[in-house]
Amino acid sequence: MSVNLTSAIKEICKFCGNDRTRMMDIVRAVQQQFGQVSDEAMNYIAKCVNCHRVEVESVVSFYVFLSKKQKGGVVIRLCNDVVDKMSGSEVVAEAFEKELGIKFGQTTPDGKITLEYAPCIGMCDQSPAALFNDEIITYLSTDKVKEVVADIKKHYDPSKLKHRLGDGHNADELVHSCVHNNIRNKGRVIFAEFKPEAGLKNALAMSSVEVINEVKNARLRGRGGAGFPTGMKWQFTRGAAGEKKYIICNADEGEPGTFKDRVLLTERADMLFEGMTIGGYAIGADEGILYLRGEYAYLRKFLEKVLADRRSRNLLGKDILGKKGFNFDVRIQMGAGAYICGEETSLISSCEGLRGDPKTRPPFPAQKGYLGKPTSVNNVETLCCVPRVLEMGAAWFVEVGSAGSPSTKLLSVSGDCKQPGVYEIPFGVKVSELLKMVGAEDAQALLIGGPSGQIVGSADFQRTICYDDLATGGAVVVFGPERDMVAVAADYMEFFVEESCGYCTPCRAGNVLLKKYLDKILTGCGEPEDLDILQKLGESVKITSRCGLGQTSPNPVLTTLKNFRKSYETKVKKTTNGMQPTFDIRKAVKGAETIAKRDSVIFVK
Amino acid sequence: MSKPKVATASLAGCFGCHMSVLDIDERILKLIELVDFDKSPVDDIKEFTGRCAVGLIEGGCANEENVRVLQDFRRHCDVLISVGDCATMGGIPAMRNNIPLKECLDEAYLNGPTVYNPSGIIPNDKEIPLCLDKVYPCHEVVKIDYHMPGCPPSADTIWQTLVALLTNKPVDLPYELIKYD
Amino acid sequence: MSDQITFTIDGVEVKGKPGQTILEAADAAGIYIPRLCFMKDLIPHGSCRVCTVFINGRPQAACTQPITEGAIVENDTAELKEHRKNIIDMLFVEGNHFCMFCEKSGNCELQAMAYRLGISAPKYPYLFPKRDVDATHPDILIDRNRCILCGRCVEASRDVDKKTIFEFVGRGADKKVAVNANADLKDTDFKATDKAADVCPVGCIIKKRVGFAIPVGQRKYDTKPIGSDIEAGKK
Ligand SMILES: Cc1cc2nc3c(=O)[nH]c(=O)nc-3n(C[C@H](O)[C@H](O)[C@H](O)COP(=O)(O)O)c2cc1C
Ligand code: SF4
Ligand code: SF4
Ligand code: SF4
Ligand code: SF4
Ligand code: FES
């Protein structure tokens, strides 16, 4: 074993306290330094943290940013999300292949650059976009690909890539990114002027129970998708047995089409940490974790600095703002490319240094979460609402919005619209109003809540966006009149196939089959019965899957089958001759014809 | 009224399923009262003489000749049945399905441990049908109406299925007769 | 807290103890809920989803869901039978199951479940994935073509044998059982006497030189459907 590798691993593991629950940090660091986590590395890590080698491999093989195989020092990951494809990522992909002289999945012969695809990297509003290691390059075109490839080949250091700077904190020297916030509409809660730390001060003047009651009175519900009442979650966590508790902020934002948390992390980091601190006070936690998706690593240094500043201002640390006995701090846990880690129990697994498998419920995280301790997992936006509730009071918070869904919601709008970006709108807004606002009056379809939500057509444009009608964690993708909704559904199924953790049968195998039937229809081989199979298979996956991923993954198929049935019906046709339309004799004998160097005499061309 | 006709074929199979048909013992006499055999290795009729009520297919499609025969059966038979695991899922021949064809041929004719082939040539005569890229279960080539699982399906399975079909009753196999081996 | 919980399964009243799962309580009452990944003495983890039942209208895995007072459980319904058949069909097409030469045939829980549900052939297209075989160990063979990723071997090796010979690697459709070595099972300290050598519901982890020991006709599921033993205990 190379001395270099062992000493580096020893160092890394030591830095992480030789603690196997810090496995994510360890393997991320090894990957970063060596471009792989090799067999040797896994053996040595296992030795250092006293676990089994296969347990290290089980983690490394789970996350797409980690690999046993050697990767280039620069890994380019082009986003192949549906929205990126709509804005031309396919020609951009060709340009990358041409400029680098390799195909996707390959590394340049000099071993320096690896080219890959990535699912939604949270830049739909400025697509096509790609990651160069941690750096993000947006608004890609064939010309721009030429430029960046030439640039990177000069130094092979993504941090030296030349690009203009984005707005707001994107231009901060610690972010130094070309990403744009694209804040299109400022509401009264999140993007309005606010008094920093006023909420925290008010909270610390109250008892924790009073804080929870205030949040309950504000009827704050989770903004991450599921919409669970935040006050209740905190109450459960507070009430659960045990001294040690945790609050975790879910900044995994992996739902295709969602990017509002990215903007909050950039522009409202202080507000977020203030919210976490109030949450920690409310539930009785002295430790918080920000779980940051690997794709947002470009924000990490900046967020660390915000945390350091807060520590120096006694907004974190011991006896916060003079409140005796209230200690709280936050650490950042990086993800490594896995959508499922946004699911709260997978996220906890990942924080514990495990594969991102969801956990069996019950027990729920509020009872037994991170390291078996009661844990509250809250979305970024949810936590940003908290200081405002405490600053302005619950009564103020519920003034806008609809009856069942008070206050405002951030929407990430992208796709076929004139003004993609983040909109803070009051709950209860009509879809048609939203479409007008974003410049998409000719929309054919709308994806609301990401692929795990629903795809609706014009019949639903008079409905409203709120928990009781069209619920959404924030993603709104617009599809113009010329888009093929069956193809869109197939693309989203591809995403779920890639992102299923594989733990349970229906999601692991069922999504693959759903995709297969959609492809069959898209290649013109579909028959009317296939629509029925899709429906039944989709229902089985939904009903029998173990976690939220599988329970919603058939939605792109099921909601388009319902709302865009015509599009399916025009693509399928009944076969009358008894033959299987999918069987292609030419394709089936092609290999043998090549090997035999003659054509078939039975099936003459 | 003339008796309904039954045709049978063995594609990429071992003839075990046909043996199982013969295994219905004395019931074969009853069967002959019920049906006439058309194209089948049982009576050596090589081409269809007319429309058949039932076609029994043993084996999956490993080569183009199998495809031709199967498609011919589909055109001539009202009800087409996959008999046995080879017809149903490819069976033993389908073990090659995740290995590229070239590797399979090389192993079979050049590199295999028991191969004696001094000429070093992979047989390639026009008379030899070309292999398909993989072994296809019958229902992936043509529409199949029923599947009789088993390797081979027991004589009882075959008998009960045929009698049910010929007497217009639903095919409903009891527990003991659904077997995959 | 009362020490008895009463609820119903398909309208039949069942009593159980606090902390029991629906599946355990059903077993004790002689009601069979189909299952594959569950195994007595291992921590239930809900991976196969065959045991899905409706509890007060919500789908849940019976093997992990605790019983609650007054719960209305639906198990033996036409709808659930369809879902279960679909899951079994998925398992057959996502692997390579050549029952005709599998040593486990006749004693295999996957096959038996298909028999019980009356499946004559899976309805989905076969995926014929490429999976590997590890025959390096002197006493044990791993044929991943037949693995249904149930997790029993992983748990038994970790929790009972305290060895962690097996773990899952990869995710989604690429998920597979790996062994605690750079390459093969022979490089681990796995023993044929380990609990993990006896838990595989299918013919993936099997003992060498046993082969087709039991004659056809006398194997576990040749004449009696899987679950009959539980149903025989019906009160
Ligand atoms: C597959 C899957 C992915 C998810 N991804 C996210 C995510 O990226 N961010 C998030 O906040 N919640 C996500 N959730 C929801 C979380 O499980 C959880 O409900 C949420 O973080 C709770 O926070 P909230 O109550 O503040 O919304 C996801 C759920 C599932 C099933
Ligand atoms: S539904 Fe099952 S396979 Fe899919 S992500 Fe959840 S646990 Fe994993
Ligand atoms: S199913 Fe079995 S008996 Fe029938 S042809 Fe195939 S191998 Fe032979
Ligand atoms: S494991 Fe079971 S289902 Fe699979 S081949 Fe063996 S007997 Fe058949
Ligand atoms: S090897 Fe057997 S016990 Fe282990 S996961 Fe696969 S099927 Fe289950
Ligand atoms: S037995 Fe319950 S999920 Fe497998």
Image: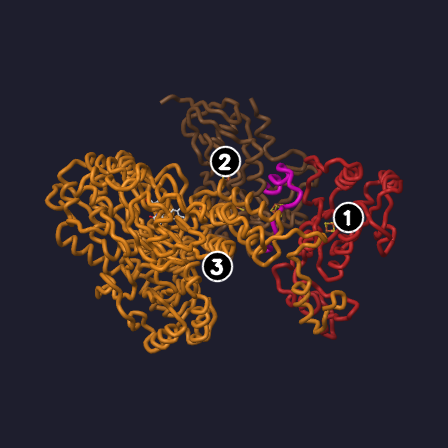
Chain colours: A orange, B red, C brown
Image mark for residue C126: none
Comparing A295 with A416, the one in front is A416
Q: Residue at x 67, y 41 (%)?
A: C214
Comparing A143 with A31, the one in front is A143
Image mark for residue C40: 2
Q: Chain of mark 3?
A: A
Where residue C114 appears, as percent x and y from the top left, is 62, 41
Return the residue at label 1. Answer: B56
Where residue A43 appears, as percent x and y from the top left, is 40, 59
Return the residue at label 3. Answer: A482
Q: In whole angstroms, how far apart are the C-alphas of marks 2 and 3?
A: 56 Å
Q: What segment carries the magenta color?
A: C109-128
Other-residue count near label 1 (Cα within 10 Å), few / some / many at <14 / 14–19 / ≥20 = many
Residue C65 visible: yes
Label 1 residue SS: strand
Q: Chain of mark 2?
A: C
Query: Looking at numbered disc 1 in the image, what kind of residue is underneath it?
Result: Leu
Where residue C62 appears, as percent x and y from the top left, is 48, 34
* Left or right side of C151 for A193: left
